[in-house]
Amino acid sequence: MSSASGDTLSLRRQLILYAALSFLAFWFLVPFAWMLITSVKTPDEVFSRLLPSVLRLANFVEIFNQPTLPFGRYFLNSTIITVFGTGASLFTSAVVAYAFARLNFFGRDVLFVAVLSTMMLPAAVTMIPTFVLFQKLGWVDTFLPFLVPACTGNAFQIFFLRQFFKTLPIDLIDAARIDGCSNLRICLSIAMPLAKPTLATLAILSFLSLWNDFMGPLIYLHSNEKRTLALGLNAFAGMYGTQWHLLMAASVVATVPILMVFFMGQRYFERGLVMTGMKG
Amino acid sequence: MKLNLREHIEGYLFISPWILGMVLFALGPILASFGLAFTRWNLFTEPEYVGWANFQKLAHDPLFYKSVFNTIYYTIFAVPLGLVLALGLAMLVNHRLRGVNFFRTAFFLPNVVAGIAMLLLWKWLFDPNFGLINLFLDWTGLMAALEWISIGRPQWISSRAGAMPGLVFMSIWGLGGSMMIFLAGLQNIPRELIEAAELDGAGPWKRFRYVTVPLLTPTIFFLTMVGVIGSLQVFNQAYVMTQGGPAHATLFYVLYLFQTAFERFQMGYACAMALVLFIITLIVSLIQLAMGKKWVHYQ
Amino acid sequence: MDRTILFYSLCILGIVGLLSVPTARSLLLGLDTSAQKESGRTEIVLAGWGNTQEVAMLNQLMADFEAGNPDIKVKFIHIQQNFNTVLLTMMAGGRSPDIFYVAPVTLGNMLSKGVLLDLEPYLEKSQLVGVEDFFPQTVEPYRWDGKRFGQGPIYGLCKDWSPDFLIFYNKNLFDEADIPHPDGSWTREEFVDIAQRLTKRDEQGRVMQFGVYNNANPEQWIWQSGGRIFSADRRHVLLESPEVIEALQFAADLSTRWHVAPGYAEQAQSPVNVMFETGRVAMCFYGQWFVPQFRKNIKSFAWGVTTPPRHKVDIYLSGGMVGYGIYAHTKHPQEAWRFMEYLVGPQGQEAIAEIGWNIPGRRETAYSPIFVENPNLDAEITQTFLKAAERTELFHRSPYINPAEYNLLFNPEWELVMLGEKSVPEALADAARKINQAIRDNMALQKTEVDG
């Protein structure tokens, strides 16, 4: 892979670059840093001091001791929806994408255009009838409105996985066919393992969007013990207002899992993005 | 293509979950929206057919126009700003530097921690008196400068004038995703092309203008599409931070749709709004596709 | 078979197997595990909200009730936000709880949808509860004959209530400014004067301490001026009447003219309780239900409670009263009533008096030592509240517009006033036009139910 500006830079230019990058990075990190700092402050020091004089880790204990806002439960709910949602949709998307990339069937290209158009479809357009459907099915206030659609795949993921499967050498697939492998088997045991970077990238993106989803839970999850962290945080802000030290502690707790997932998958992430390629 | 029945069947079996999903969660709802948009319905009574009444009401609804205006305003400022800055950042982090990965991660990080937590934090940062932003302006003396040029103390999301600029400003922190995709695009540019341009005597600006940008047009096109469609759907910021206020200054289209459906229970009217959004999205996408043909260069 | 395929098949089988276990279904899919069939017990679902203490109290009451009524099992659904909206959504989806909190604020809208059970027949037979046990003001808003409130069938009974807009004041700040503690005999002019003396600015002109935080509902001011928001038949808003304009002009002036109360920018972002607790505001408006929290949180200064400044009418308002109602289409009205009877009966009400966080709806319990001498409360403050309660009326709301919709139409106009961009009469005229239009639209939509 080539880098556009791959030449060794002069020391002076390097220094200028470092200075510029550090300056910008500082601003990008300030909000998150402020969140971290506030989360360990005492209530008195939230406004009066830039940095805390003592680390008040009790904030983190306190937020888990709110029986009306069971953060532990919220955490679990968010995890269930995110992990199962991501797993189910990636698996289905991979199988569907493989068919679009590697199988010849009637109307394939037309259907693929349909995939592309659903990618562009704003969720708000289908929000109301979908809500009515789930309501009639009695799925409101359950996780099914999140898990069942996930099982049918995701247009965005199908698109990117198809792009990747297209790049697989045809010989590889043919060889497997000659060995008598079924298409399902080629898809699951040859194509998917090769797609690891793409899958990891998509998993991170899916994890981010499900974990941070707000409107979905807002519409579908009502009772206290079913809510997700995003809803819980908003409720917390509504109830305790600017008890910033607690709110920020709760926010930190809510962001740690996605940070972990991101850093775990990061080594794939950039490669995945490059490989899926925006070649159009 | 040789007709191979087995492969046809297999193909459809493979994609059957997606077909099911599309019918149930995309096509069906869109069709249902078409039906419901012509009814008056509050979830409790039976839907009552009212013809074009909802659309007529929409045509005279000042809040509808307000929300369309706000959404377009946001799109026009946030999308180009985000693209330009993202490209700039991508070019900065495309250098072969020790530790450049740290900076890439730093710029992407706000996308990772982008949930409600961050919005609540931003609400605080924007506080006119106790928010970090104005405190910073005070501290650096920039506030005095602002007051001197008679802009006065920015009230950010607490004022009608400052709310939208505030949200656009905040959107800058979310450009890490675009930056990553630009970075991928930049790394796909063959080095020989740049070197050839350099040999031809093209300076940095010319190389950027005549080599990098044309080769990035597919990426720019993709990000514009995604960005515009994303902007049309802004909801969380407005719901969590401003509730559409002050005085409708941040009433985004989807927020208004949500309020109509789930707070006022005017399901038919909301479906009419959803249809309009569908058509707007369709038109915007088609325009972009048509324009894209003119300026996107595929390798 | 290929190992990969085997692996995926096992995964899928495993998940399916797991989901056949009810507990796993409830945990992973969020499905309710219904205990309805369990040993012939009827399950009654109660939906409500509440803080830690209240939930603990409810759990205790539920356990006690179940012990005395082995044929009934009670389940509590905790809905912390957008309660009314969520409840209506659940009803529309056919998953309504059997008993739920009904606040007079949201009652009107439920009546128009016919989702509340008429309690009159049950009350007639009850040995435990009678309407005359309750503060009469708390009963009136639950009666509705289809045209007027205060008469006809009764659809709910009060759980707890309070005058919600008495003034909490920081005694230390009053002392510092050398102002005598208020005894409730003040006029609006005196009130503004005091608030001005309690407002402090820093050298940049930023307000560091506000005299008052006007978090009183506009209705407190309106009723004191002799006005009402809704017409008697609740089919119009009277926002353009001189009384309402006078009242809201005063409310707006506190922020925009005298600058003794936070303006829009400060108000939008700093919760009142926190500002009061940190001494950044000298006075604010709350009900009895804030006493326990302030007693817990405020250590650095002394505070008291008094009535808002006197005006034309000596009256206090309650917006936060909560009662119980029963779903009209519940499968178990008898069992639901038995539980509700328990909740609003002496035992349920004493539990409320004991945690002391609000005034019990039963008058006898409210004046009983359990509440009046509650060690978690300040006896003097309790007396102030009880005295005001006798002169307290409930908000009026309309069956033809839900509060969320009303607020969506009213708040933006009010925000313009608070931003100083619109005059009070203009804003009220525009709000009135929009709200009246919405009421007409809604009545057209509810036509069958209104006439039928």
Image: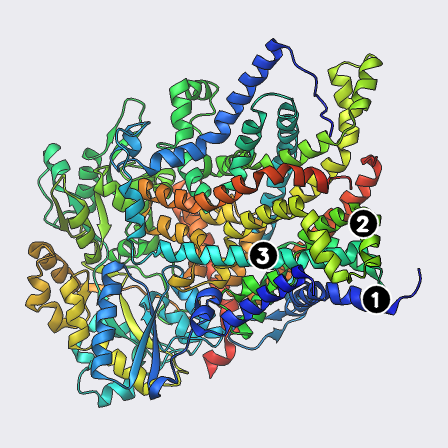
| Closer-to-camera residue (B257/C333) | C333
Whether the residues at callouts 3 and 1 have beta carbons within 8 Å, the answer is: no
Could you tell me which chain the residue with mark 1 belongs to?
B
Amino acid type shown at disc 3:
Gly
Q: How many C-alpha atoms fall within 10 Å of the one at disc 3: few (<14), some, or many (≥20)?
A: some
Say which residue label 3 marks.
A87
Q: CA distance from mark 3 to mark 1?
A: 27 Å
Q: Are marks 3 and 1 on the same chain?
A: no
Give the chain letter at badge 3. A
Q: Secondary structure at mark 2?
A: helix
Kindly identify the residue that appears in the image at 83 percent across and 18 percent down: B196
**What amino acid type should be assigned to the residue bearing mark 1?**
His
Residue B43 appears left or right of C137: right
Q: Estimate the x, y position of residue C393 in percent, counting from the top left.
A: 23, 65
Instruction: Measure the C-alpha gap from mark 2 to mark 3.
Output: 26 Å
Image-quadrant location for residue C312: bottom left
Above/below status of C372 relative to B96: below
What label sits on residue A172 in the rendered view? 2
Disc 2 to disc 1, how far (Cα)?
Answer: 21 Å
User: Residue C63 appears in which quarter of the rendering?
Assistant: bottom left
Label 2 crowd bin: few (<14), some (14–19), many (20+), radius 10 Å? few
Looking at the picture, does residue A95 appear above or below residue B180? below
Badge 3 element: helix
Tag 2: amino acid: Leu
Query: Where residue C46 appears, x then y in whole percent?
Result: 33, 73
The reply to whether residue C184 is in sight is yes
Q: Are marks 2 and 3 on the same chain?
A: yes
Q: Residue at x 25, y 74 (%)?
A: C62
| Secondary structure category for the residue under label 1 | helix
A240 or B158: which is nearer to us? A240
Look at mark 1 in the image and give the residue it sits on.
B8
